[in-house]
Image: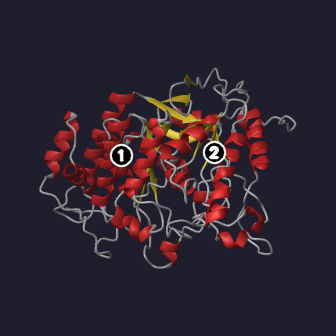
Amino acid sequence: MNRLPTNVPRGRFDFEHLPETDQSFENALAKARSGERLTVADGVELLTTGTEFEGIDPARKERVLEAADRRRAEVVGEEVTFVVNLNNNVTTACNTGCLFCNFKDPAGEFERGNETRGFSKTPGESRRIVRDAVARGVYEVTSVSGLHPALALNDEHLEILAANGGPNYKPASAYRVDPGTYVEQIEAMNVDGVHVHSMTPEEAAHARRGTDWSYESVYRELMDVGLASVPGTAAEILVDEVRDVICPQKIDSAEWEAAMEAAASVGLDVTATIMYGHVENEMHRVVHLDRVRDLQERTGAITEFVPLSFVHRNTPLAEKGMVTDGATREEDELMIAVSRLYLDNVENVQSSWVKYGDAFGLKLLSCGANDFMGTILSEEITKRAGGEYGEFRSVRDYVEMITAIGRIPVERSTDYRERRVVDPDGGPLGPMLGPKADGTPLTAGRPAPADD
């Protein structure tokens, strides 16, 4: 067989989990086609197109993609959804030291008298940014930020940290910009009925550090001031031997799951992600999928699964020579496809144009994905890592791209409960689901109201 290479650096790390199974590719594919629930061994066979050989077999790959696309059509039909959203990340200050990340800046750079390329926003600045976006028709604000040492859950938490010298804490007075508290930031972004999608498990852990507070209490308090759903980022790979390499200071896999279960228990929807294409192998990827599927069995709260292909440029993993590339296109296709086939209890699988670009992102919509992300308005994380695919897509862009591949463009709410099929001939080609959305094209803009 003429097989395509993979970019997973097998053998470079002494991992316990290896892409080896007693299953066969043909048996795994037959189960996938029949709709039978897959095992980890099945998933590994499909993701590798057969573990008995190195590399990806193109013909077998196409059979996996075909099965996933058929499953997509059975589960969600021909609609391709997108959301009209804004990214408002509060700060790039972070001391966690994840080797895959180039979004962060050392927190010491933000102290008085120092210089940084990064940013921190006050709650007032966050509110102005979100108010402007809502006035233009945006109805979701996504906020994923660095772990600033001065950020705490609330005023009581600040007092506890100040009294006890808690982990990764310095008072706001040490910094040029006071980011406020998580409660203040979420409350500030809670403008005119916008959906606030924020507080990853890692941020929730930061918001309870130095206390015996539960994740439930953290999420409940934030929900009271406007938090509406939780992004399941910070998952990376939910296998601790991989996390020990790429993000040893982050919470472990069990802690990530505990935070997600807590968010679900207080009534918050959540998403789930995987970041692949760095030091992990295919077994790690499928074990991750298995943990996500189990989490969904327990909670039913996961609205979408988002595979994120690692952008290696400008990251410490690349600078240290630990990786030389990200995933191949074939690996991206198989990751989307096997996610669709394996996650039989998660309805929506997302293709990210930020990670894959427009053309390839559209191709992945025929590999099992049915959601094409959001308008973004501002994207900083992937861009800093060397991403090349821009920061913004309008409703018109979405309609043109989705109809070009013969699918149906559908504007959706964050939770997928509200949907609007967009007629490319009858418009309107602007957002309609937001509290101030009236179909005006997003690029036109509108003046924001004066500050309160």
Rendered image: mark on residue 153 = none
The residue furthest right is: 450
Q: Quadrant of the N terminus?
A: bottom left
Q: Nearer the viewer, residue 65 or 313?
A: 313
Residue 388 shows up from this direction: no
| Residue 36 vertical placement versus 276 (above, below) | above
The residue furthest front is: 163
Q: Nearer the viewer, residue 67 or 243?
A: 243
> Disc 2 to disc 1, how far (Cα)?
25 Å
Mark 2 crowd level (few <14, some 14–19, many ≥20, 10 Å Cα): many
Q: SS at mark 1? A: helix
* Residue identifier under label 2: 376
Apparent side of residue 366 relative to residue 358 in the rendered image (left or right): left
Of the two numbered discs 2 and 1 on the same chain, state the one appearing first in sequence: 1
Q: Nearer the viewer, residue 234 or 400?
A: 234
Q: Position of residue 207 (x, y in %)?
A: 58, 53
Apparent side of residue 324 relative to residue 197 in the rendered image (left or right): left
Q: Residue at x 52, y 45 (%)?
A: 231
Amino acid carrying label 2: it is Ile
Apparent side of residue 328 relative to residue 358 in the rendered image (left or right): left
* Residue identifier under label 1: 292
Q: Quadrant of the C terminus?
A: top right
Amino acid carrying label 1: it is Val
- The answer to which quarter of the image holds residue 399 is top right
Q: Residue at x 19, y 64 (%)?
A: 53
